[in-house]
Amino acid sequence: MKQNLLKCLLAVSVFCLFLTGCNGNISKEDSSSEETSQNNGKNQGKEKVTLSIWAGEEDKEYITAVTQKFIKEYEKDADINIEWSPVVEGQCRTALLNDVLNGADVYTTTDGDIQTIVAGGAASPVINPEEIRTSNIKSAVDAVTIYGTIYGYPITADNGYFLYYNKKYLSSEDVKSLDKILEIAAKNKKKFAMDWTSGWYLYSFYGQTGLKVGLNKDGVTNFCTWNSIKNSIKGVDVANALLEIGRNPGFKNTTEWIKGIQDGSVIACVSGVWDESLIKDMLGNNYAATKLPTYTVAGKQIQMACYFGYKMLGVNPYSKNLDWAHKLAAYISNEENQKLRFEIRGQGPSNINASKDNEIMQSQAVQAVLAQSEFSELQRLGGNYWDPVTEFGKLMASGSTGGKNLQSILDNMVKMIKASTVG
């Protein structure tokens, strides 16, 4: 990693930052009294710009570094002051829509919330849509595109899941097939671990089958065809495949795959980039990651899919410095600063060129999640999806329906998924 660059940036930030309370103001004006005195004459006539930005507490180091670079980049054009407040992505939508007039000029949010933010009139269309389209992977661009208009600046493309595996037991050829993974795991009295109590993960068996689930136009209720009897791959076909996996001695339904890897009982698992450092440390030279395998359903090999998420920067249309807010968002999301985000936060970039950087190419997890993104879908689901799928996943993982009719089980699950949220 470019440690020298990072150390320099952080060293500069020690002298250039003045943090006040929870607002964490980042201001060029506060660099030092001596510098301010020396520049008073120079700054006369220059535009004074104050911008606010919301980002999570964990982004503090990154935001500090990149905003100082932004201030330096434009010091000849304006006297810039940037005020940072720690607002996590999951809280951004509510905080913004509750008081958009006093919301941040630039904010960090997710693909799951950007449509609601746009509908609430709290997102300004980007000023460089063609640049966004050509510099970022298509799925990230799609995530910030609402009714044909781009409303956000993509900054990450890594919120998905893929396969981690132990090279002591599994080869790169073995992990192409879930059947083979289970066979080798069972033979060695080991496990392939995955969480079937979560609809986020269980979706992986449906995404490439033609069976669909998603959000209706009302933005609240779901549609679902997981019980279809007309599709080329029927609902019972997938359910039977799940039951067979559930009965396999090489499979374990669990949320604690890290413990399994640590004690040696798990040789492959499904997770995301957030587990890379732990798994890499545990497996050492036997560490590897790749896209999800295929699995057998209705006599066919079907690629496992995943839900995939993206982070992005939005710009408040009520910003008093709207042009500068867009400049800041575009700057933070550019190729160089997405590389810096990876160095500091370990997050995978959405920028095409950044993802080809040597250091990022060496991250097997980032490369695995990018490869898996080809077989992914944005998560757009109403609240009634989760509980019935959890119960269904538990039942399938047990390997038995307990004598109940499988089609009836599917029909009942789908009925609950599609149920109205009113009354």
Image (cartoon, grey):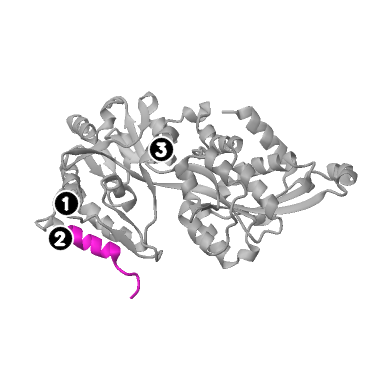
Q: Residues within 10 Å of mark 3 (few under 14, many from 20)?
A: many
| Main secondary structure type of the part rendered in magenta | helix
Dot 2 and dot 1 residues touching (CB under 8 Å): no
Does the stretch in magenta take in 410?
A: yes
In the rendered view, would you say 145 is above or below 420? above
Q: Residue at x 23, y 53 (%)?
A: 394
In the rendered view, would you say 357 is above or below 221? above
The residue labelled by disc 3 is 369
Q: Residues within 10 Å of mark 2 (few under 14, many from 20)?
A: few
Could you tell me if residue 421 is visible in this image?
yes
Using the image as rendered, state which of residue 175 and residue 414 is in the foreground. 414
Using the image as rendered, state which of residue 239 and residue 391 is in the foreground. 239
Q: CA distance from mark 2 to mark 1?
A: 10 Å
The percent coordinates of residue 408 (x first, y second) are: 15, 60
Q: Residue at x 35, y 44 (%)?
A: 306
Q: Which residues are magenta?
A: 409-423
Please name the amino acid that badge 2 sits on.
Ser
Q: Secondary structure at mark 2?
A: helix
Q: Which mark is residue 62?
A: none
Q: Which mark is first along the chain, 3 or 1?
A: 1
Position of the N terminus, as image quadrant, is: top right
Please name the amino acid that badge 3 sits on.
Val
Please name the amino acid that badge 1 sits on.
Val
The residue labelled by disc 2 is 408
Q: Secondary structure at mark 1?
A: helix
Q: Residue at x 24, y 52 (%)?
A: 393
The percent coordinates of residue 27 (x first, y second) are: 74, 48
For this orientation, the residue located farthest to the left is: 403
Q: Which mark is first along the chain, 2 or 3?
A: 3
The percent coordinates of residue 360 (x first, y second) are: 50, 31
In the rendered view, would you say 49 is above or below 173? below
Q: Which mark is residue 236?
A: 1
